[in-house]
Image (spheres, rainbow, N blue to C red):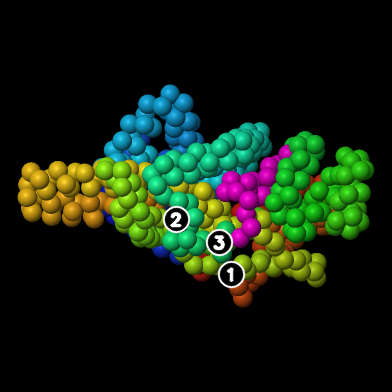
Amino acid sequence: MGMSDLFFGYSQQMQESRSAQLRGDFVVATTSVISVNRQHNNYGLSQLEKARLQFLSHDWLASQKSFELAYQQVQDQEQAAKIQISSGLKKVSAVVTNDNAIGYEIPSYEQGMLHSYQALNYLYQGSLEGALVEVRRANLVQERALKTNQAELYKAEEEMAEKGINSNKLYDNFPSMDNLIGDLKNSFQNAYTFYLSGLLYETAKKFDDAYIDYKRALEIYPNNTFLQQDVLRLANKLDMNEELARFEQRFGRYQGQNKTNTGQIVVIFEQGIVSAKEEASLNLPIFNTRSDFKFFTFALPVYRGRLSALIPLSISIDEKSYLSQEIVRLESLASKDLKEKLPGLVTRQAIRLVAKEQIRQNLSKSGGDVGNILASLYNIASEKADTRSWSSLPDNVQIMRLDNVAVGQKKLMISYAGKKQVVDIDVSENRTTLINFTALGNFTGYQTINL
């Protein structure tokens, strides 16, 4: 770990890469990601950034390899956490510096996106089986987080309370992220990963598995009409008559027809780029070494502002137009993840601030005013918020599905933010044509494949 990691925030280090990404210059964006070795605290995060940018460059193999390295880092961290050796040693160094000295632990929502992109990498290289392995891994991430998340939250709040910090006091003083979070229940259940899983299971004719994951996605996004139709279609196909009746009461009667000489079009639309974390300062009272309260200044990460405007993708085909619908706001998941981690962040920083204050007092006694001043300057300079996150992710993902499209060569008129683009596709009988469309700043791009 270099000194720049301690004294300059990650968001600041990624500015050049993010600017290039918004221009659609993915080669520069990739090379602007700081290269680090496997022992570096940001190694896994660096691989995620590169993998996403290589994916945008349509370099599927390079992206696959980078994601594999990131996934290996996740596995290594999980093993280290089990034996409580490596992770514990790294956190000791954070006591006298800041949280950037701790190895970046890829949160569950980022792990889910890792496997979703990796599934697409395999798909674009012709391996449906490899893609299915990845969506299973994405589902396991969410299942594991669902089992452990609440217990971890309670434990973090208890440890924070032991330092004399009241959670209500923390959230009253911390900049609110509620307008970014919305009504999310947690930070890890991602309707898009469930939808992609359902789509690939359906492609593999594993209809029971597809039905389960479409229902999971619908539970998170009940107003998405494409998800509603997916669930109705498979409930009908699988003769789930009781469930079909319940869903029809909620969403209306199933209108689908299996016409001959037709195929389907599915669009995955990735819009924008997720916001970077910023630093926020707030004063909180904590127990010091003499077991009395003293106010300390905390430097904590925060997401500011409001959700960016959601602009749907419009597709015209056969004299009809359709609009995409949101299926995940990664900005919201990131904000919720940060809010859930705040108690742990505050507890670590409280321990660190008390330790630094003790060092300052000792230096003041041994070095007089000079020692006191130097220690104070170090404490101020080194206390930086941990602004690390997978910052090349899209702001949101939207979907669209068109059924019973006549087979043959088709010209789609795609409209986004006042710009129009013609996309040529080939619709095959009883097959799905997948279009992955990306809009970043002034850049738009797409990839198509017949599943």
Does residue 6 appear anywhere in the picture?
Answer: yes
**Camera-side residue of 177 and 263:** 177
Name the residue rendered at 61%, 60% in the picture.
182
Q: CA distance from mark 3 to mark 1?
A: 16 Å
Q: Which residues are magenta?
A: 182-202
State the quadrant of the C terminus. Answer: top right
Q: CA distance from mark 1 to mark 2?
A: 30 Å
Are the residues tagged 1 and 2 within 8 Å (C-beta)? no
Residue to which mark 3 is pinned? 178
**Camera-side residue of 88 and 71:** 88
Are the residues tagged 3 and 1 within 8 Å (C-beta)? no
Depicted 447 relative to depicted 203: above or below: below
State the quadrant of the N terminus. Answer: top left
Q: Is residue 183 magenta?
A: yes
Specify the label residue 309 is tagged with: 1
Residue 149 in the image, given as x and y percentages of width and height: 57, 40
Amino acid at dot 2: Leu
Q: Nearer the N terminus, badge 1 or badge 2? A: 2
Residue 213 in the image, given as x and y percentages of width and height: 73, 42
Residue 274 in the image, given as x and y percentages of width and height: 50, 58
Residue to which mark 2 is pinned? 170
- Mark 3 or 1, closer to the camera: 3
Q: Residue furthest bottom?
A: 418
Name the residue rendered at 52%, 46% in the picture.
110
Amino acid at dot 1: Ala
Q: Nearer the N terminus, badge 3 or badge 2? A: 2
* Mark 3, other Cα within 10 Å: few <14 / some 14–19 / many ≥20: some
Are the residues tagged 3 and 2 within 8 Å (C-beta)? no
**Camera-side residue of 424 and 138:** 138
* Mark 1, other Cα within 10 Å: few <14 / some 14–19 / many ≥20: few
Depicted 180 relative to depicted 219: above or below: below
Amino acid at dot 3: Asp
